[in-house]
Image (cartoon, grey):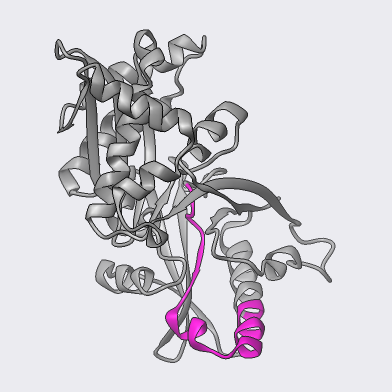
Amino acid sequence: MDYKLIECLDNNTWNEFVLTSPQNNLFCQTDFLDVYQQDYDLLLVTKGELILSGVVIIKGDDGAPVKNQFMYQGVLFSKHIESLSSHKKIKKVLELTQFLLIELESIYGVVSLSLHHSLDDLRGFQWHNYHNSKGLQPYLNLHYTGVLDLKKIGSFEQALMNVRTVRRQEYKKCIKNGFTVEASNDVSILNFLHEKTFERQGMKRSKSEVFLATELARESLKKGIGRLLICRNSEGVPTSASLFLFDNKTGYYLIGANDPEYRKFGTGGFVVLEQIRYCIEQGLSYVDFIGINSPLRGDFKTSFNANPTPYFTFSLG
């Protein structure tokens, strides 16, 4: 097969590969990887001068791969593979997956990946070590995210008509009651409301959840890949906050946070709809709601007309 696995040390080369891949997503781009503040390896599978696939490996403080990578931090295939005829593409994807997993096992041992929802043929992952019972065995776990296809929506007014009736009613109620939305760089408001959201549920935030609402939020705003919206009541009191991240085609719903006292007004939905309005105005193709894997959260996110979309996590162990 003459494939080689090499480490990519040039950010421009890596980002160009990601941006032209069918699995293109923000979480594999170095702008996000740098604000994520964990060490990582960027690996490419090549044949001669041609890049065929790549993978992101996030490493913990001990230098070993982490057990749970961030969403979609996994395997990507090149535009060259995507351009092949169907039967050639199917064969190449299998070959490349099998080659890559053998190499990853030999380098790292235990590996965990989050696979982009565009990957629909996962047999190469499923069949790893099929004839080697002594090798590490593969595990695929099913998850769901919600994807809103903005290409099918001509305007924000159309998006508003497509959401669940209660979301539309809440939106109008917020306007009627003098709630306003503004872009902000004040991450302390997001963090404060995020903590109150967890307190209402009788839960305490993990270190990683605090990190997302503080340092990652702050750095993503500085990098220009994030947008924080704050909803205030008529007296200027913050009631809800929404942090979206962006790449060249998708807006990602990263954090939603609310003051429980204002839940009856639906300000959480109000601020999300304003983020969707921005995505439409920017000409983006999708909104990814970043997981709909619990009943209440999943119901809230799909109420914006997001389509339940399966994706898988993969691990060797």
Task: Name above or below for residue 101 compared with residue 177.
Answer: below
At horizontal 36% and vertical 16% (from top left) the residue drawn is: 265
Quarter of image, res 257: top left
Left or right, 13 with respect to 40, comes to left
Left or right, 211 with respect to 181, comes to right
Left or right, 108 with respect to 155, comes to right
At horizontal 66% and vertical 70% (from top left) the residue drawn is: 121
At horizontal 49% and vertical 46% (from top left) the residue drawn is: 306
Q: Which residues are magenta?
A: 71-95
- The answer to whether residue 208 of the structure is visible from this angle is no
Which of 176/268 is in front? 176
Task: Name above or below for residue 257 compared with residue 86.
Answer: above
Left or right, 21 with respect to 317, comes to left
**Residue 27 picture location, percent across and down:** 39, 53
Task: Name above or below for residue 186 compared with residue 2.
Answer: above
Quarter of image, res 167: top left
Which of 251/142 is in front? 251
**Residue 94 picture location, percent across and down:** 66, 77
Classify the position of the N terminus by image quarter.
bottom right
At horizontal 31% and vertical 27% (from top left) the residue drawn is: 172
**Residue 84 picture location, percent across and down:** 54, 89
**Residue 315 picture location, percent across and down:** 65, 52
Q: Is residue 75 magenta?
A: yes
Instruction: State whether the magenta stretch is mostly helix, strand or loop.
Output: helix
Q: Is residue 266 magenta?
A: no
Which of 64/170 is in front? 170
